[in-house]
Amino acid sequence: MERRKRWLGFAAFLCLVAAIGAREIRVRPKDDGPVFNHTLATILVEYASAVYMSDLTELFTWTCPRCEGLTKGFEVVELIVDVQNCLQAFVGVAGDLNSIVIAFRGTQEHSIQNWIEDLFWKQLDIQYPGMPSAMVHRGFYYAYHNTTIRPAILSAIERAKYMYGVENIMITGHSMGGAMASFCGLDLAVNCGERNIQVLTFGQPRIGNAAFASYYSQLVPNTIRVTNGHDLVPHLPPYIPRLPQRTYHHFPREVWLYDVELGSSVYPSEKICDESGEDPSCSRSVTGNSLSDHLTYYGVELFAATWGSCSIVWDPRWTEYGSKDIRGNILLSKNNAESSLKRPSASGAKLDIV
Ligand SMILES: *[C@@H]1O[C@H](CO)[C@@H](O)[C@H](O)[C@H]1NC(C)=O
Ligand SMILES: *[C@@H]1O[C@H](CO)[C@@H](O)[C@H](O)[C@H]1NC(C)=O
């Protein structure tokens, strides 16, 4: 009961922030951003959904229930499970997209409500290296930069390029996974000299201030943040237009999914938003008060089967491909271009980590 009250109070506070936002004076941005490709978004959302699956064997062999459909034929090169920090990501090659695809899972810790409530209070507490006055949140930054995730991804990209001869890199993720996808894209552009990077995230929170957003949009111009209806996460941590330099600020370009009602029919629509990152006529034109809008994009579920635990399932017979570090973090890697791995026939042993 107490919890519910807190949650309602929190939703009310969000409305307040949205109301302040409505009075902002709009600066006309110039329109030369990335081209939004709807088909690509509907493909990448399936990767962002699959990375939530907890059966590592099915994920590694791309035979999971969410590995059908538009992502069929994907070749996983590396599956990374940072058990210590409850993070999951994969790197692989999509032949039909002629691209490496990297996907990050959203948060799995505690309840989603707790995680979202905490988002409200996230401080801009560290400076992004080499970018004066660009401030970001420590938690998002370290989830990518100070875990097993980054080194495993960088090495997998090199292997994928070598094994499959592809150069393009598409990075995706939902929610917290979208925040990590953004940091990954920026890292590859700034520190690895990658040029063919595309970032497309779903329902991601804000990750830095206006100065950061400005650097980001110049360095990773081919970035799309898809937001959905009243999804509350893109509204967080709050942006306060009267304090544009002090608060969080999204980078462009947002694409907002919303419903157009015509008579008794409802048509799903996409709005390509402006170059400011904080287009007041996109998701900011509505109140961020929906959890269900956060959990489904383009009709695709973006959450795990079991919330609130970091349980994984894997088959110890995959040790040929897998390794565990001293902290229990798991890496499943492909080192050559074997395209059809044989699956062990019996079902996998279960390993629960909470
Ligand atoms: C959009 O993406 C799809 C899938 O990658 C591709 O086949 C199509 O050519 C793209 N469309 C445009 C206009 O670039
Ligand atoms: C970075 O990771 C190490 C090992 O997990 C941890 O001990 C350390 O506190 C982390 N540093 C920060 C600043 O979070």
Image (cartoon, rainbow, N blue to C red):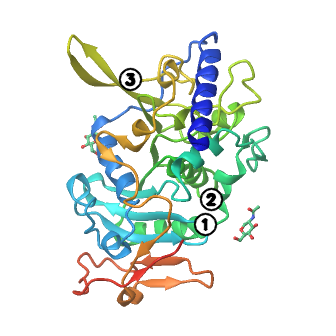
- Residue identifier under label 3: 271
Where does the image place residue 145, in percent across and percent down from the top left? 65, 60
- Residue identifier under label 2: 143
Asked where in the image residue 35 lies, by quadrant, the reply is top left
Q: Does the residue labelled 1 lie within 8 Å of ligand 2?
A: yes
Q: Which residue is drawn at 40% across and 53% down?
A: 303
Can residue 181 be seen?
no
Asked where in the image residue 86 lies, by quadrant, the reply is bottom right
Front disc: 1 or 3: 1
Helix, strand or loop at label 3? It is strand
Which residue type carries mark 3? Lys
Q: Give the alpha-carbon distance from disc 1 to disc 3, as whole Å.
A: 35 Å
Q: Give the alpha-carbon distance from disc 2 to disc 1, as whole Å.
A: 8 Å
Which is nearer the eye, 250 or 131?
250
Q: Quadrant of the N terminus?
A: top right
Q: Are marks 2 and 1 in contact (CB under 8 Å)?
A: yes
Q: In which quarter of the image is the C terminus?
A: bottom right
Which of the numbered marks, if any, corresponds to residue 85? 1
* Image height of 352 relative to 107, above or below: below
Q: Which residue is drawn at 75% across and 27% down?
A: 245
Can residue 66 be seen?
yes
Which of the numbered marks, if any, corresponds to residue 195? none
Front disc: 2 or 1: 1
Where does the image place residue 132, in percent across and percent down from the top left? 79, 40
Please report whichever mark, 1 or 3, sits nearer to the chain's N-terminal start: 1
Which is nearer the eye, 152 or 169?
152
Q: Do the residues labelled 3 and 2 touch (CB within 8 Å)?
A: no
- Mark 3 surroundings within 10 Å by alpha-carbon count, few (fewer than 14), some (14 through 19), many (20 or more): some
